[in-house]
Amino acid sequence: MNKLFAGIEAGGTKFVCAIGDSSGTILNREVIPTTVPDETMPLVIKYLQDNYAKTPFSAIGVASFGPVDPDPNSPTFGYITTTPKPGWTMFNLLGALKKHFQLPMGFDTDVNGAALGEYRWGAGQGLDSLIYYTIGTGIGAGGMLSGKMMHGMMHPEAGHMFIPHDKVADAFAGVCPFHGDCLEGLASGPSIMKRWQVKSALDLPPDHEAWDLEAKYLAYAMANTVMVLSPQKIILGGGVMKQQQLFPKIRQKTVEFLAGYIKHKNIIENIDDYIVPQGLPGDSGICGAIALAENAFNNL
């Protein structure tokens, strides 16, 4: 019988809590609004306690919005750190769980978690390396390199990379409160809404000029990613990427920006299989959280 694991995908809007097994099957889930810790965390803990009483699980994995501290040797390991989300700055998320459960726990960013989920059970199965981008309310990236999640000084913040911005063709200043016109500032969901004065990107028709500009900025990021990290696959998720017309535009522009320098069949011949949608639509993050739990159990 497969062991059971608890996963928490902690997002800025909602916490998705689930119980799953080592095959990536989600047995049940609950969605809890992200308000403030004193309101959200008791509901998360109750969900876990109720499920543990019925069908005990072996470990807990958390894939969280950030920035976070993913370094097990750090005194603030398991904290959400400098987030602008009210109430969550320097919140000890893992510590709040450890008060109630004496179980192995895994912890990482939401995008690294999604990358791990895709690596285990989605579009990245069988690969040694991949990069996962989420393009939505913000832009973030996580990845697997040599079969391990990407870490270094802290964790990737590729959403804040700087990309070419022709301010004559596009005078929009960007929405990032830190950098203005970084990738997130120019290509996130809120940037689309503010630039084009709409309440939702869904309000723009598929043939709107917004999507050519969006594809251009995302393709700059894809070309940079190919040059710097050379992953075997790039997976794009998040609410903006539900606009399926973006994929061919991004692929075409990425090849154009690489300008023949990368002479690999993945770029020259198989770009449609290189820059791809999620293999686990809507579930990459929560599956990754379950995989984090399994990893924590296996690393005891």
Image (cartoon, rainbow, N blue to C red):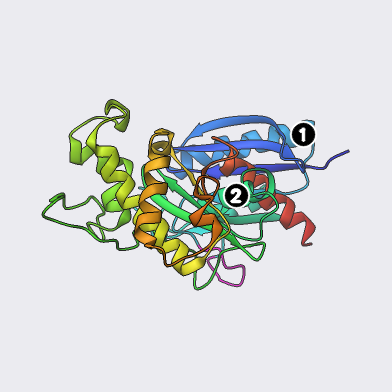
Q: Is 231 situated left or right of 81 in this image?
A: right
Q: Is 212 covered by the magenta stretch?
A: no
Residue 62, which numbered label? 2
First reached walking from the N terminus: tag 2 or tag 1: 1
Observer able to see residue 210: yes
User: In the depicted view, which residue is nearer to us: 185 or 5?
Assistant: 185
Residue at image location 44% in from the left, 67% down from the top:
227
Observer able to see residue 101: no
- SS assignment for the magenta stretch, majority: loop
Give, as a single range, the part of the protein colored magenta.
69-76
Please tell me how crowded label 2 is: few (under 14), some (14-19), or many (20+) other residues with Cα within 10 Å: many
Q: If the image is split into quadrants, where does the N terminus sit?
A: top right
Residue at image location 49% in from the left, 56% down from the top:
267
Q: Is 164 situated left or right of 135 in this image?
A: left
| SS type, badge 1 | helix
Q: Is 230 situated left or right of 213 in this image?
A: right
| SS type, badge 2 | strand
Q: Are marks 2 and 1 in contact (CB under 8 Å)?
A: no
Q: In which quarter of the image is residue 27?
A: top right
Residue 264, which numbered label? none
**Number of on-image labels:** 2
Q: Name the residue under label 1.
A: 53
User: Which amino acid, by three-letter code, is at mark 1?
Assistant: Ala
Q: Residue 92 at what x, y percent from top left?
A: 52, 56
Q: Residue 101 at what x, y percent from top left?
A: 70, 48
Please tell me how crowded label 1 is: few (under 14), some (14-19), or many (20+) other residues with Cα within 10 Å: few
5, above or below 220, in the image: above
Residue at image location 43% in from the left, 53% down from the top:
140
